[in-house]
Amino acid sequence: MRSYIYALTQSASQVHRMLTLELFTPNDDARPVFVTGNFNGWSTRDEQYKMEKIKEGHYQYTFKEVPPTVDKFEYKYVKGGWEAEELATNGYPPANRTMESPRGKVNDVVPNWKQHSKGYDPQFYPDIQIVSKRFNLPQLRRKRRISVLLPWDYATTNKRYPVLYLQDGQNLFEDSAPFGTWGVDRRLAALAQRGMGDFIVVAIDHGGSERIKEFSPYDTPKWGDGLGQAYARFLAETLKPHIDTHFRTLPDRAHTGIGGSSMGGLISIYAGIMFPEIYSKFMIFSPSLWAAPKVYFEPVRFTPYSDTKIYLFAGGKEGAGMIPNVLRFKEYMETHGFDNKRLHIKLSTDPQGRHTEDRWGVEFPKAAEWLYG
């Protein structure tokens, strides 16, 4: 009798935790619908949360057990990306849908959907995949979300592709990012439509409150222990081998790049200094060189390696020291062991350029075309 009651209790508990979302949308199209929210890091193309199409304009998804969240349960519907998120009747994206106690059955209506941004054909939109939401960083004893943006035709070819490792993954392609986005997904699509951008982007999420320490190459009185060396080792010794094993990459130095902005630009420079045998292409936007003056004296480590390309960007509205610091770094690179046959640096400056994700997004296709063209 006790076992019978226990079974009933367990069954009732499971039902209690189940949540079914029923979605009705009058303006449907062929694109699949995904549920995204704080339960999956707002990933917009997570196959685990792809809705079942019952019929035209009617979708369903059941959480057999709702994933735990720190705050109240928040979610939205998207057709594969933020460039195709749900719209309210007024034509604007609505606020996040929320539930204090996510369970039972909920009926939702999406009147319309955002269309792909102008400037590219949707067929060239990259295939965004989550490698892992909790990828292990053994060198730092922590975990991190890693995403890949695969070329639009990756699944239909047998080609191998160059790779670009970019820092601050949260800010690269998700419009919900708190500081804005580079829009790398849309810019890759526009490049692909012109026959360019044929490379894989690996997006590494930053460590939140630990971001500055992880991106700091050296110990400092202000931030304490710099974890940049351990982070650079993670990229080279753990992440790159994993990506090369699970995706069709061109793993050699000539086809491997790294980049980032601000502190992400700084750690990308340092990672190249530590592992010059791995990276030959650098996309460095507004690097925080002021945070690690020692890095100016490191470029000599590059000298045994040839054919290195560095794209540097700095804006005039980022502070008085940004452009002078980048010019100083460029000069060190050019005068300490390199010659112009082995080192190629392209410097881009914008007198009105600000320290923003959007401005770096504008620069991204220019840098990508020069580095990978």
Image (tube, rainbow, N blue to C red):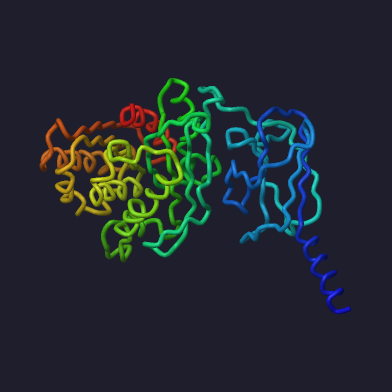
Q: Report the side of 156 relative to 252 (left or right).
A: right
Q: Is residue 185 left or right of residue 165?
A: right
Residue drawn at 67 percent across, 48 percent down:
75
Quarter occupied by the C terminus = top left
**Placement of 351 over or under 118, stated as above or below:** below
Instruction: Give x and y (percent) for residue 263.
Output: 34, 49
Question: Residue 289 location in percent, x, y?
Answer: 26, 48
Residue at image location 49% in from the left, 52% down from the top: 145
Residue 196 appears left or right of 29: left
Asked if 31 appears above or below 215 in the picture, the reply is above
Residue 201, horizontal then vertical, whole percent? 42, 39
Left or right, 326 with reference to 171: left
Q: Residue furthest bottom?
A: 2
Q: Is residue 23 above or below residue 73?
A: above
Any part of residue 46 in sight: yes
The residue under the point 47% across, 59% down is 143
Which image quadrant for residue 6? bottom right
